[in-house]
Amino acid sequence: MSSETLRTSRVRPLPLSGLLRPGSPSDIWFKPALSVVVAAAPPNLTLLALGRLDLAVYTMAGSLCALYAHNRPYAARARVLALVVLGMVGGLALALLTASLTTHAIVLVTVGALLAALQKTLCDATRIGPPGNVIFTFITSASLFVPQSTSQVPGHIALAAAAGAWSWIVGMAPGLLRPHGPERRATAHALSAAAAYTASGTATARADAAAAVHTAWQSLLSTGARSAPRRPLERLLVRAEVALAAPADTDPQQLRVRARALRGTGPVPQPDDLGEAAEELLGVEAELDSPRRPLRHRLGPLAPLALRTALGCALAGYVSLACGVGRPYWALVTAAALYQANVTLTWRRGVQRVVGNIAGVLLFAAVAPIAHLNQLALVLCGLAFSFGAEALISRNYWLGSVCVTPMALLITEFATYQRPGEPITDRVLDTLIGALVGFAAAIAVTNRRAGDRIEHALGAVERARERAAAVVAAEHPAPRDLEAARPGLSAAVVDLRAAADAAAGEWWLRALPEERVLRAEQAGHRTLAATVRRQGLHTSEGARA
């Protein structure tokens, strides 16, 4: 049996090694890091000049929206950022309204837990992220424990909405200089992943490359109607698909050269070795015309994660209250931040969260004397930590948490300074409570739908493979049918791998059909290769080099 097959034991071992090892930074780590600083600085400095820095806790809700959608093409980014701002302002409004109506801690924790579960579900279903649901949960949970009167709520919401509108402008502004930058980066990543597969030939590299190509196609499709600047990118993605179909005949160095060119600011390289068969990508038009999967169908499989989040956050908040913490929102946020696709990934995130938060608390203790010199120092320290969080979090989650923790503590001090001892003690206690209780909830709430998702994914791959095989076997297949068969099968194979990976780290499941998954993946990739060859896209790039 292959070493890459899925485990079938009911309780998976929890990893300890490598959890804190830094990785390579994201290609665009500086974009969210700079954006959040540019989005937060004007509102904070304006309020500072007006002597109302206490209101910055509300403008920060809108400013943090600038963290989102940096991997999206600008046409799609405009829509996503608008939805992020609306979701942030809506969650804040509900939290502030609740805070104005009651100060009962049990009620506030319960509302916060339900909001966290809703935010987790919607962010996962719509794939909004990074950073996903955690920012929403941090804002709404903290706001639940800010004293309010009902008459103050509209003004505070208006401040958040204004800052959110500024964040939208900040997020869209780079499009004026490089309007197709996100699509170029996605295509470059697909070419690099295809080059890695042609060089190594491993099943893992093949799955990674297929996922990168699929993601790049989704990036292009999200822009809507096809445009002239986008067509060369489509042809480069076909080149990546050809590499997956015929790795032995592909020069990986040529793919890497094209990927580097795309990451720069020069013209898009033209893959002239594909011939006339790639001139009309009819499958792209078919994909654009196909209906999107309804949101309710995407919400169903997420029910166990929603229940884990609601239960874990609520219990973490209640335990924190029982331990004497007056504002237990950080325990709630810690629990919400843990939940990933399965128990094993949740464990990894929990360890990283605890280590990062404790290190961040120590960093706050060291920086607090400087931040407390005056309000300007407080604002500047907050901006510096917000930049550091985004600069480091793509290397490893715990590194980002080292900066997120002091940033969050400084935000709570915009209204009034606190003696460092009390918030430090509460934060450490809440972190440990949130991590332990949150992980216990992840174990208690089983996700048996992870196994069902594999069965559905296997069926989808088989149906897509049969359709593609029938087209390939036809004596004179129509070009439109050939091109339309490829993206559907490619997406089904990628979804199968994602479902298998998610189930592999889940507990309390029946034995997983690892052999069927491997056979289905292999058959799917063979059929994809046959489809590419039947289209006449396969040329020997190695012979041309």
Image: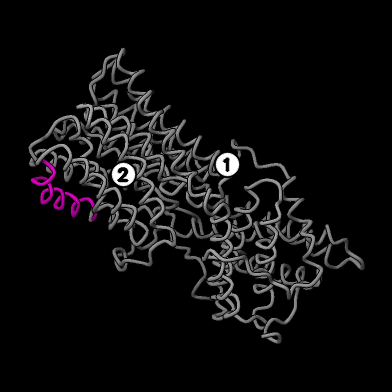
Please, what secondary structure does the residue beneath circle 2 have? Answer: helix
Please report whichever mark, 2 or 1, sits nearer to the chain's N-terminal start: 1
In this view of the protein, which residue sits in the foreground, 315 or 173? 173
In this view of the protein, which residue sits in the foreground, 69 or 163? 163
Q: Is residue 162 left or right of residue 355?
A: right
Which image quarter holds the C terminus?
bottom right
Residue that carries the numbered disc 1 in the rendered image: 298
Please, what secondary structure does the residue beneath circle 1 have? Answer: helix
In this view of the protein, which residue sits in the foreground, 9 or 96? 96
The answer to whether marks 2 and 1 mark residues whose Cβ atoms lie closer than 8 Å is no
Q: Give the answer, above or below, for where 307 lies relative to 256.
A: above
Please name the residue shown 27% across and 35% down the image.
44
In reply to whether residue 34 is colored magenta, the answer given is no
Give the percent coordinates (x, y) of residue 141.
Answer: 31, 32
Q: Is residue 137 left or right of residue 451?
A: left
In reply to whether residue 370 is colored magenta, the answer given is yes
Please name the residue shown 28% across and 54% down the image.
388
User: Which segment did they paint magenta?
Assistant: 356-372
Q: Amino acid at mark 1?
A: Arg
Q: Nearer the viewer, mark 2 or mark 1?
A: 1
Quarter of the rendering containing residue 150: top left
Give the percent coordinates (x, y) of residue 259.
Answer: 56, 70
Q: Badge 2, how many Cα within 10 Å: few under 14, some, many 20+?
A: many
Quarter of the rendering containing residue 17: bottom left
Residue that carries the numbered disc 2 in the rendered image: 438
